[in-house]
Image (spheres, helix red, strand yellow):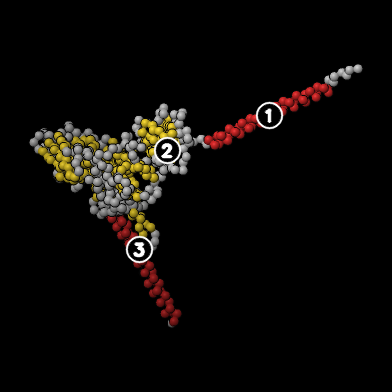
Amino acid sequence: MRKTVCKKIMKATAKISSAFFAFVIAATVCLANLNQTDVKADGEVTVSAVTQKTNIGPGDIMKIDIVANKMPGITEFGPIVFNYDSDKAEFVSFDQGKDLTNFVFTETQTPGSLSVSGIDQMVSIGSDGSGEDILAASFSSLDSVVLFTVALRMFPGSSGDINCWISDTGTFTAVSDSVPSKIGSGITLPITRSGLSGDATIASLKIRGTTITPEFNPNITEYSCSVERSVTEVQVSVTASNLWAAIIINGNQYLNMGDNVVSIDVTAQDGVNRMHYTIHVIRRESNIPDDASMVDKDGNTYTFLDTPEDAMIPAGFTQTTRYINGYSVPAYVKDGVTSVLLYLFDGTKSPGFYFYNAAEKTVLRYEEDNTIIESSRILKMTDVPSDVIIPDEFRPAKYNTGSVILSGYTNKDGDFICYLEDENGSKEFYYVDKTDNSLSVYRFADKKAELLYSYLFDVFLVIAIIEAVIITITTYIVKRMVSERTNPRPKRV
């Protein structure tokens, strides 16, 4: 009886276990299928070509946005191949999407085709909670994103339809996994307009070296931007929406401090429609960041200042900017000269120009009447230290190089020397070659040593003469003795 009950219990347990394992396996398969479906649905990217244009004609510019329906943490994409009818339009420009500022784009253009790739250069590193570092894209969106924009201009004789399409989406990668992608919609737009164009808008507006605000839109007619104090002229780049529209730009030269108004007047091909665009260019009163300063190798602090309008810049130097001590500041440079020229204030002397050697962290004040600027170095006249003795044969004198009058010393032979300091802080006497005014380090001869060498020479010369006489006499005596022994004289009987 007991055995029968045990057998029944074992059979029931086996059935329950089998049913449980079957349920677990079925649930696992279902979950796996659901997960696969979700990953594909969430990650798939569709790339399409879209435009806001509805009416175009010969000479018109058409802008096409290449749009991804989502960007789920993409770190690299492409090459995306965009195509267009090369017999109807020509390529004008390419702009990357404003949301993808952290991406670096590469493009390859041929007639009728543009291949574009992008790589996220700002991939972030985070933690997964266990202490392990994980990579993450710098940008992610489940909404549509403009990857890049292409501008095409219709040929003057274009007619019929213009077609634009995506032929390849390339590969979309999120950190390390590929994300499925597919080709979306393209564009077929009729070139319908005939006759003279009445379009007086512009398709693009840029100012070199600065950014306009708000973001450019053909229907927004007023913008603003700012430039550095050193800028007195801005280069305005404008592209008309229609090839035959006339553009006139005024006010972009001779900028004053503060607000300057640059106007752009556009007249359509029909001569009737006009547009007026205005850019307020603010020329800043200072090029120097607040509290910008630097410290030299000796611990002296210098404050950066704006260069006065009437300051005399040394010949051959041109203005640029340099990143010094964490600040972007105006500087003057010359080919072949290592140091840069800065306008500084040391807290005691009046503000002025200084040569700054970044490698040595040295600062040397520039003074027009005593500074020599050579192709590879800067030299400046300085006082001779009190412990330096100048030989008696040198007398104080001056020498005019044509660019600066040097104070120094000359001797009876006409040699001219002067005491100079270089941009590294080293101080030496320099000899001036009067044939070409070149400079070379000069060393005084030690007269005491020369006199001692002269005495020693005379002594050794006398000794040498005495030795020669002794050797000569000794040789004569030896020869005579040998001769008498080998040829004795006959004795008298």
Quarter of the view holding residue 1: bottom left
Q: CA distance from mark 3 to mark 2?
A: 90 Å
Q: Nearer the viewer, residue 136 or 296?
A: 296
Give the residue at mark 3.
28
Q: Nearer the viewer, residue 273 or 177?
A: 273
The disc label shown at residue 466, or none: 1
Look at 89% across and 17% down and name the residue there. Answer: 492
Give the crowd class for mark 2: few <14, some 14-19, many >=20 residues within 10 Å. many
The amino acid on which the numbered mark 2 sits, given as a three-letter code, is Tyr
The amino acid on which the numbered mark 3 sits, given as a three-letter code, is Thr
Residue 121 in view (yes/no)? no
Q: Are marks 1 and 3 in contact (CB under 8 Å)?
A: no
The amino acid on which the numbered mark 1 sits, given as a three-letter code, is Ile
Q: Quadrant of the C terminus?
A: top right
| Mark 3 secondary-structure assignment | helix
Q: CA distance from mark 1 to mark 3?
A: 119 Å
Look at 31% across and 51% down and name the residue there. Answer: 74
Position of 277 with respect to 297 (left or right) is: left
Which residue is most to the left? 272
Q: Nearer the viewer, residue 116 or 241?
A: 241
Q: Earlier in the sequence, mark 3 or mark 2?
A: 3
The disc label shown at residue 474, or none: none
Residue 110 in view (yes/no)? yes
Position of 382 with respect to 222 (left or right) is: right
Q: Are marks 3 and 2 in contact (CB under 8 Å)?
A: no
Give the crowd class for mark 1: few <14, some 14-19, many >=20 residues within 10 Å. few
Q: Position of residue 26 (x, y in %)?
A: 34, 64
| Mark 2 secondary-structure assignment | strand
Give the residue at mark 2.
419
Position of 390 with respect to 330 (left or right) is: right
Q: CA distance from mark 1 to mark 2?
A: 48 Å
Q: Earlier in the sequence, mark 1 or mark 3?
A: 3
